[in-house]
Amino acid sequence: MKGPLSFVVAVAAGVSVTWVGLAEGAWWLAFPVGLVIGGVLARAGEGLVAAAMAGMLGWLLPLEMLQTRYGLAPTIASLAAIVGVPPSQGFVAIVLTGVVGMLLGLTGAWLSSAVGSLAAPVWRRVVRDQRRPPASSPEVW
Amino acid sequence: LRHISIPRLANLVAALLASAAVLYVSFFGAGPLPPLGPAFNPATGAWTMAADAASLGSQTLKLAGLDLPVRVIFETDGTAHVIAQTDHDLFLSVGYLHARFRLFQMDLLRRQGEGRLSEVVGKAALDVDRFELQLGLLRTAQAEWAQLTLDDPSRAALNAYAQGVNDRIDEAVRLHQLPAMFALLDYRPQHWTPIDSLLVKGDMTQTLDFNDTPLVMALLDGTLGSDLTNKWFPILPPNAQSPYEPGPYPVKATPAPLPLMNAMSTAEANSVAALYQRLAALPVGLVATGGDSNNWAVAGAKSTSGGALLAGDPHLHLTLPAIWYQLSMDSPNYHASGVSIPGTPGVLIGHNQHIAWSLTNGQNQATFFYFEQQDSAHPNQYVSHGAWVKYQTVNYDIPVRGGATDHLIVKLSSHGPVISDRGLTMSVWWAGNLPSLDLSVLLRIGQAANFKAFRDALPDWHAPSQNFVYADDQGNIGLVSAGYYPLINGGEPWLPLDGSGAFDVSGTIPYDAVPQVYDPPGNIVWTANQRQVGPDYPYYIGTASNFFDPGYRANEIYRVLSQDQNFSAADMMALQNDTRDFLASEITPVLVKTLASATLTLGEHQALDLISTWDFHMDIGSAGATIWWTFWQQYLSATFDPVWKAHNVTVARSELNKALGQDLEAWTLTDPGNSAFSAGGVKRTASDVMVTAFRATVKALIAQLGPDASTWAWGRIHTRVLENLARIAGLNYGPRPDRGDAYTPLAAGNFPSTSGPSWRMVVDWGSNSFSGIYPGGQSENPATGWYSNRVDTWWDGLYAQMLSADQASASSGTVTWTLKT
């Protein structure tokens, strides 16, 4: 898979894994999800965006489900109070939730892409060097 | 390495740092931020309060340990009615309900008592934990549990209650429904034990009964001098009060004279100062600071309905969630309706089918400090009755979140725990450290049908000493001030005592001799933390200063109830909401008379006109109330501050206003030439100081509120706030302008006021009507409609009907839970 399809698949898979992780209390799964996405998608920018989206959507979609089932207005007001902002700025709690997911995914992808970008050229050179016969080695008769 | 690109290496380093930062804040939080990952996890974090709030509909729930199905009916305001077929199931279900709605509050309360707050909030709470472990609530709770025999009904109740709490903890963990604060602080509650319930009871004992007055008296003795301290902080109140048991009293066999105070050594004084500072630094509620509760009863012969009336409003720190959870409990052997404290089974204040009861704090001295004699030749020993005795020691490990575990060794002398080693060693004897089977007493009260059974239940109530008011369905009333009243052979118990043995606590006043009345001739009984007895009472029970209330609320209540008329339940409610300041009613006429001959400015004249026509009610819109209260503070200041300055007194004068106010009241009314008015070096009388104070009052109020005295409404300076228990300011209620002051039956001391009537209950046995209200709601979840839904009703002085389970099930809008295994 290449191009937009791989991007969409990566985001969808990332959201699914993140969501399941949250339900089981493994909120940190967004980070390894980002690691994988950053390593799988070839272009660095693409990987970062996909992982950030997977993290953010993975955290916000369950909120949307809570809103649909229970209504979130009183909870948003309460969390706003806990965070220390007026009820009118309760969106801060939602933003904060999305940002946590996004940052976990984003940093995961950034880390794997940074490792990849550093390791890949080195690896290529090492492989190339191993394939080339040493110039000064003595011939064996 | 020669192949490594520097920019790419820098990118990797940056990615590593960013990842570490994000993961750190997500796992551990930073500064005021909680651990963001678990806290904001939509499935298991703080967002789950939405699901919790939506889960209150009628349903069937499975609880492990129930014998038979239990029915719980919730009224629309959240009041719960538990109907169980066995006593065991009743207490189990109450444990489940408490945990269902107040689990975080319960966990905080037990952590406070067992010295484990640092484990969840970090080293900021370490001093509190160390103090609590030294004081010994945990040791006392363990001893109480050990004392309960296997066949004691309260043991079974505590076990069943703990099972119910644990049923809820397991359920909440399984369903990801733990209260939001657990997510924000990132921990899970441990299972509940019966000892945890006894710790919660110990917390209440401490907040009502552990007192630092001997330290204050010692500091006054050391700075103000023994002469003035004896005069101004006497044992018997200098003002006229209204004891509910005026005597005559049983004769004491050998009444011991109370000697005058002696000067303390410098080392003793320094040790006292160090301990005083330590206690002063503790959070509100860990040291008792004087009670502010009311209760009274009117016999059937004096009521309009013909049945006895009872009113009770315990005044405590007002928090959200509140200290109370309202419910009715019905099982084959237990029927009670009223308020309970989450963490403990049973109704503390309420009624059953035949009697009603309420409590105020007894206030007698229950805390005694001792200097232990030590020397370097006898390490870890102290002198007791001429012999060197080894301290007992107890070791504690205090887990500290984000830090190393703290190790604490508590030394125990025969008096109690060593509480200070700064300078001289001091230990504390506190009645709350002795086992008190309060739950057993409450269960028996709940089952009592008459005064004999009620009174017979109370000898086992030891601490905190409480004034139990009583009214029954036969028109009878009574009051029993139950608890330990420690006696000391000589010495000066209001000061720290020599610990060598001569002044040890030797016993308590016998139960038959503690203050109590039954069906008195006046057909009324009342307490408001005043000294319960008159000057002829043969036992020392505490000084007028700081132990007992100045008596203004009690005087006002007595003034109303002693009128020649019959009363209704509505009259009881009006009295609970009474804002008339008794002290003001005494002093203001004297002030007005004094000012009549003084030369006043225009502003002072306007203020005088307002206070001349004032009705002594501390109402929100009253300018007279503002002028009065400010005047009284200025009057205290003008009288005593010169003395405080001259003697470098180390206790803030404002901390002693209630004690000094009694002196000032008495001098103003009966001794205006008292030398205290001239103690600053200038010859003055009460009138001189009143004029000075009034001028200062007007000047201060013009500066604060503007030149027009008619706009100086009390509500502009006096507000009340209900504080969130987790100290999240955004979840407070208020501050909001409110009526009352520290001396009115509707108590509202301080600015803003953070304590007051935590529950108001009125019972009329003539019409079988029961009314009650507390400021708060049944749930600690701020996203539910039951978090603060009762506050406005309470604020307006209104009440809700306390329905029986049958009445509740017949009312509209109720929700029913069926609990079964």
Image (cartoon, rainbow, N blue to C red):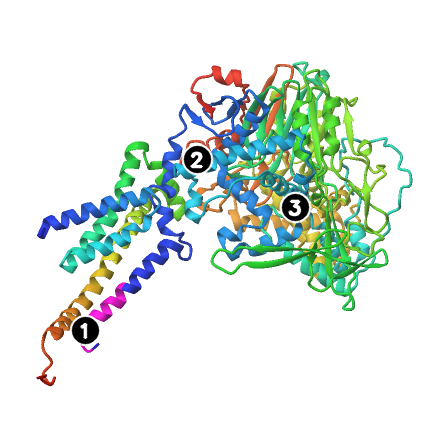
Q: Residue drawn 13% across and 74% down?
A: A130
Task: Tell me where residue B230 appears, x and y as whole percent.
Answer: 81, 51
- B440 relative to B813 in the view: left or right: right
Vertically, is A109 above or below B662?
Answer: below
Same chain for the residues at labels 2 and 3, yes or no?
A: yes
Tell me if I can see residue B646 in this picture. no
Label placed on residue B819:
none
- Name the residue beneath numbered marker 1: B5
Q: Is residue A112 magenta?
A: no
Identity of the amino acid at label 2?
Answer: Glu
* Residue farthest toward the front in the current orientation of the protein: A141
Q: Is residue B12 magenta?
A: yes
Q: Nearer the viewer, mark 2 or mark 3?
A: 2
- When asked about the image quadrant of residue B520, the answer is top right
Label placed on residue B289:
3
- B391 relative to B748 in the view: left or right: right
- B84 relative to A83 in the view: left or right: right
Tell me how far mark 1 sits from mark 3, CA to CA.
69 Å
Q: Which residues are magenta?
A: B2-15
**Chain letter behind tag 2:** B
